[in-house]
Image (cartoon, grey):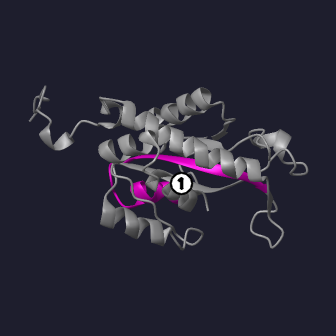
């Protein structure tokens, strides 16, 4: 829903922010399948479209409400306090900074979620597809994940939509998107040689 509403928002030409977004950025909004069993849908999309930036939208756990879990090992993520953004080894610190700056400018609540080497979301599609793309993961805190009684807060969903729209605009405003670049190791030069001891 977040992705579809965001695409509808960006398509609205009456908003001058959207015109700048479309002039400066190539935005593709997709919905993927098979996330829970290997992220196969998002991996195919990443290979076909080869994005420079990939932002996944998924659900996240409300750890505060989880009995005997939240206070022990996980961040204090809670429904009704805004979407989450993942911080971890595969997420882009520059892209996360864009998300945080956008949230501050727009007064959108945002909760950090520390993850390890895997976000557990389709944000991993770039890594799993061997693409050099910056990625981030936005989560909507819910209770009862993977059950028929999943529960979330509408305000968190709305906040995620507006956060992503503001982040696209923030990216479009930047003249230099160098925060996403990495050195091309194929162009590396030898800076020293190790003498052969034979």
Residue drawn at x 67%, y 36% as measured from the top left = 110
Say which of 147 and 127 sits in front.
147
Task: Give above or below for 36 relative to 8.
Answer: below
Residue drawn at x 35%, y 31% as measured from the top left = 179
The answer to whether any part of residue 188 appears in the image is yes
Task: Give above or below for 145 relative to 26.
Answer: below
Residue 49 in the image: state x and y as whole percent.
32, 62
Residue drawn at x 54%, y 45% as measured from the top left = 164
Left or right of 120, for residue 81: right
Residue beneath disc 1: 6
Residue 38 in the image: state x and y as whole percent.
52, 69
Quarter location, residue 2? bottom right
User: Is 84 inside the magenta-drawn segment?
Assistant: no
What secondary structure is found at the residue carrying circle 1?
A: helix
**Quadrant of the image for the C terminus?**
top left
Residue 197 in the image: state x and y as whole percent.
11, 32
Task: Give above or below for 135 relative to 129.
Answer: above
Q: How many numbered discs, if any?
A: 1
Callout 1 crowding tier (Cα within 10 Å): few <14, some 14–19, many ≥20:
some
The answer to whether any part of residue 121 appears in the image is no
The stretch of residues the image draws in magenta is: 120-142
**Quadrant of the image for the N terminus?**
bottom right
């Amino acid at each position: 829903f977040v992705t579809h509403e965001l695409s509808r928002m960006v398509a609205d030409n009456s908003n001058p922010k959207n015109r700048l977004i479309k002039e400066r950025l190539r935005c593709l909004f997709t919905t993927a399948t098979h996330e829970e069993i290997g992220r196969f849908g998002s991996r195919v999309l990443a290979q076909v479209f080869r994005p420079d930036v990939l932002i996944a939208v998924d659900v996240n756990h409300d750890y505060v409400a989880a009995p005997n879990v939240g206070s022990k090992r996980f961040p204090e993520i809670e429904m009704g306090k805004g979407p989450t953004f993942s911080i971890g080894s595969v997420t882009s610190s520059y892209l996360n900074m864009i998300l945080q700056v956008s949230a501050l400018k727009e007064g959108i609540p945002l909760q950090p979620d520390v993850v390890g080497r895997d976000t557990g979301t389709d944000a991993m599609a770039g890594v799993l597809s061997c693409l050099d793309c910056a990625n981030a993961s936005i989560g909507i805190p819910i209770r009862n994940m993977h059950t028929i009684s999943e529960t979330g807060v509408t305000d968190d969903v709305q906040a995620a939509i507006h956060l992503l729209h503001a982040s696209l605009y923030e990216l479009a405003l930047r003249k230099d998107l160098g925060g996403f670049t990495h050195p091309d190791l194929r162009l590396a030069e030898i800076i020293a040689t190790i003498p052969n001891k034979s």
